[in-house]
Amino acid sequence: MLETGLLPAAIKNNALFRGNAGAWRNDALKVGLPITSTPTAGARGLVVWPPNTQYAGSVGHVAFLEEVYPDGRVRITEANWPTGSGIKERILTPAQYAGLSFVRLENAQTNSYNAPPATPGKQRQYIVRSGDTLSGIAKRELGDANRWREIQKVGGGTFTEAEALNLQVGQSVYLPVGYQVPTVTPVTPVTNNRPQPVSGKLPNWQGGDRQAAIQAIVNEANRQGITSKSQIAYILATVQHETNNSFQPVREAYYLGEPNAENYRRQNLSYYPFYGRGYVQLTWKSNYQKYSDLLGIDLVNNPDLVLRPDIALFILVDGMKRGTFTTAKLDDYISGNRVDFLNARRIVNGIDEAEKIKQYAINWQSQLA
């Protein structure tokens, strides 16, 4: 990196930025490079892990900050994470980079993929990831690989076959949607005019930032007949834990980064490819089949559809309400005067991290109006 011109020329004659990664923050201070705890939109630079944090080990870890997205996520490239060799790429959410340092490099250029947001109600924005193809995106996000011709590029218009073969990581593309974007309002559960439960009808939700997702969860709970503040608080607490506070649908073992996470899933999960996906981890083929039957969507042959925000949201609320995941359901632990946030963890996963999620639920309970 010294030869790229990204670092100040004066450091070429000393030992800065050559030692353990954990020391790079102090090296940056010595040469006057700007350091922040949050990335700046459009800025590129370094991301530094202190020693012994987030699997970084005793020498710390450093990555190159490639791009900052409008929703706060960042795209990085790195080597030797968490093990192995070679350059890899992954996306970090704000929750995942909390506690890390961002160093703005002297001559780093802003990314070239700044793109306008999607048109509400007509399309949704998708950021191209490593290994993506238009047909792959169409199969995963739209349920049919042949729908790749419906995907639009920045400025409108569809891709030619030549353009489809030349996608760039970080590029924005726009997927068609058939429903309207919900209006985000303060987090307030419905307390009267109790809505009737639904069966097999997806919510009007195409994804959004953390606050929008929180409101969408509250709205979907209400839509499915849940108006108990305590039950809604526990649903929010579960998502906070399962997604590491990002409130975005995730894959099991996502924290390892790709391709390490996929290698782990293939080698260690007996239920692969029906590993955990969504706001809450839906696992096992039998559960994918249940929701295929309920929704009329083939999730068995297209398991990544469980990551689609509207499907993930429906499964989250329906599964906790009806006991689809473990047979235990919300009413078993939170009903009437009984509020057992500790044992409510059995709705999803035994008593794993039960105390921590209980505290999350207590906090959410106080925030719900």
Image: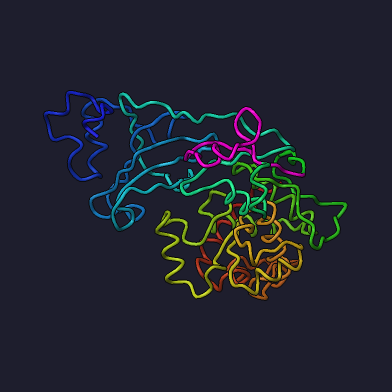
Asked which quadrant contains residue 7, the reply is: top left
Q: Position of residue 320 (x, y in %)?
A: 68, 65
| Residue 103 forms part of the magenta stretch | no
In the displayed structure image, the side of residue 180 where residue 286 appears, left or right: left
Front residue (pair 285, 361): 285
User: Which residue is located at x 11 percent, y 28 percent?
Assistant: 13
User: Which residue is located at x 62 percent, y 32 percent?
Assistant: 117
Q: Position of residue 338 (x, y in %)?
A: 70, 68
Task: State the extent of the magenta-drawn residues as a range.
Answer: 151-178
Asked which quadrant contains residue 298, the reply is: bottom right
Q: Main secondary structure of the magenta part?
A: loop
Relative to 136, does residue 26 appear above or below in the rendering?
Answer: above
Q: Position of residue 199 (x, y in %)?
A: 81, 63
User: Which residue is located at x 60 percent, y 58 percent?
Assistant: 304
Question: Which residue sits furthest left?
Answer: 13
Front residue (pair 343, 336): 343
Front residue (pair 26, 85): 85
User: Which residue is located at x 69 percent, y 59 percent?
Assistant: 230
In the displayed structure image, the side of residue 87 where residue 284 appears, left or right: right
Relative to 36, does residue 315 appear above or below in the rendering?
Answer: below
